[in-house]
Image: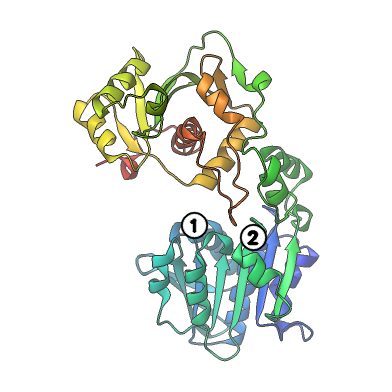
Amino acid sequence: MKIEKFSRKQKLVVNWWKNPALCGHDAIICDGAVRSGKTLSMSLGFVLWASCEFNGNSFAICGKTINSVRRNVITPLLPLLQNYGFVCLEKISRNYIDITFLGKTNRFYIFGGRDNSSASLIQGMTLAGILLDEVVLMPRSFVEQALARCSVERSKIWFNCNPDNPYHWFYNEWIKKSVEKNALYVHFTMNDNPALSQNLRNRYKKLYSGTFYDRFVLGRWTASKDIVYSVFNPEKHVYKGEVQCERYYISCDYGTVNPSSFGLWGLHDDVWYRLREYYYSSKKTGVSRTDEEHYTALENLAGDFNINRVIVDPSSASFIECIRRHGKFRVVKANNDVITGIRNVSTLLKQNKLMFHESCTDIIREFSLYRWSEKSVSDTPVKENDHAMDDMRYFVMNVAIAGNNDDIFALSVAR
């Protein structure tokens, strides 16, 4: 792998540590648009700096998960390093890479900062430097524990991220205080990646809308406002009549006190159609339904269709067990990453890849009512009018975005 050309900002990120005017900074922060070239230039600069300045030391490369670090950083970086004459010996089972360059060898550990408990994984280490990829996705406790590990003289901290909510702790504690923290701040746009053609830039601009467009395309730290799915348009996304589909799925947001919402989905010509739905609110009827009664409704919703999978809210253990016990449907626990799910739903809506039958009145109603919270300091939808919204998000995350191979789902099968 070779990079034919670096932009001015990419060169800055790769080489800042040897620039007499900049090398006195203790940290570097790169934020901005997606596909702007900040991650690759930062990871290359990080390893070059470590390999030139240290020998026999330990470093860390961190992301939300170890898999995301390997995908976003390690996989594109190693071929590039090897092309430049680095020798990289990766121990996958132990999550580290020994990198040798010009007779110097250092060890780079890989860590995932998924939640607050992850801080214990890095506790006790002594590091000469750390790279935090997509730092806004990691909990503050993990990040601060990781920073405390950088106790070697001349150690430096490398951050990169896409923008988030302007109330995010990292924006307020690091980006707004970059001078106070002695951190070099570099903001990227898509124009800072010379490998990205105009056609690809235009494609990414079409993927996002609203808040996500502001953040991922324009690179702005923008607060979520008003309606979550402002891109939804009944004239575009609601259809009449029948559609003959290739595959069928059902997604379920299960409630006892709160409403239960189930959606039947079918795939036709690369578009997902919500064919019909079941929506039951005990608050409206005054009568609660049992797991068995909801299961009967599930079977009625499925009708004679061959249902590939039923995707259920992962917290609904009793209903998942009820479905398994009947043995008719394969049931999986849904991926419940709310913000990523909302972003993926927004993308499919913008691409007109999600359609809703006119009879699905409850999900159509919720589209107009589902709003961002104005009281939260982070991106949080109001927990009202969100039951059909949740079942749609489960479907998108587990099928429409995750892929359609029904044999590869072992990790999410409800046990």
If the image is split into quadrants, where does the C terminus sit? top left
Return the residue found at the far bottom: 153
How busy is the neighbourhood of tag 1: few (under 14 within 10 Å), some, or many (20 plus)?
A: some
- Residue drawn at point x = 40 percent, y = 28 percent: 283
In terms of secondary structure, where does tag 1 sit?
Answer: helix
Task: Verify CB contact (< 8 Å) between mark 2 and mark 1.
Answer: no
Scheme of image coloration: rainbow
How busy is the neighbourhood of tag 2: few (under 14 within 10 Å), some, or many (20 plus)?
A: some
- Label 2 sits on residue: 167
- Residue drawn at point x = 42 percent, y = 71 percent: 119
Q: Quadrant of residue 11?
A: bottom right
Q: Is residue 308 left or right of residue 219?
A: left
Which amino acid does the dot numbered 2 rest on? Tyr
Residue 270 visible (yes or no): no
- Label 1 sits on residue: 68
**111 vs 394: above or below:** below
Between 101 and 212, the one lying in front of the other is 212
- Residue drawn at point x = 44 percent, y = 44 percent: 336
If the image is split into quadrants, where does the N terminus sit? bottom right
- Residue drawn at point x = 70 percent, y = 53 percent: 222
| Camera-nearest label, 2 or 1 | 2
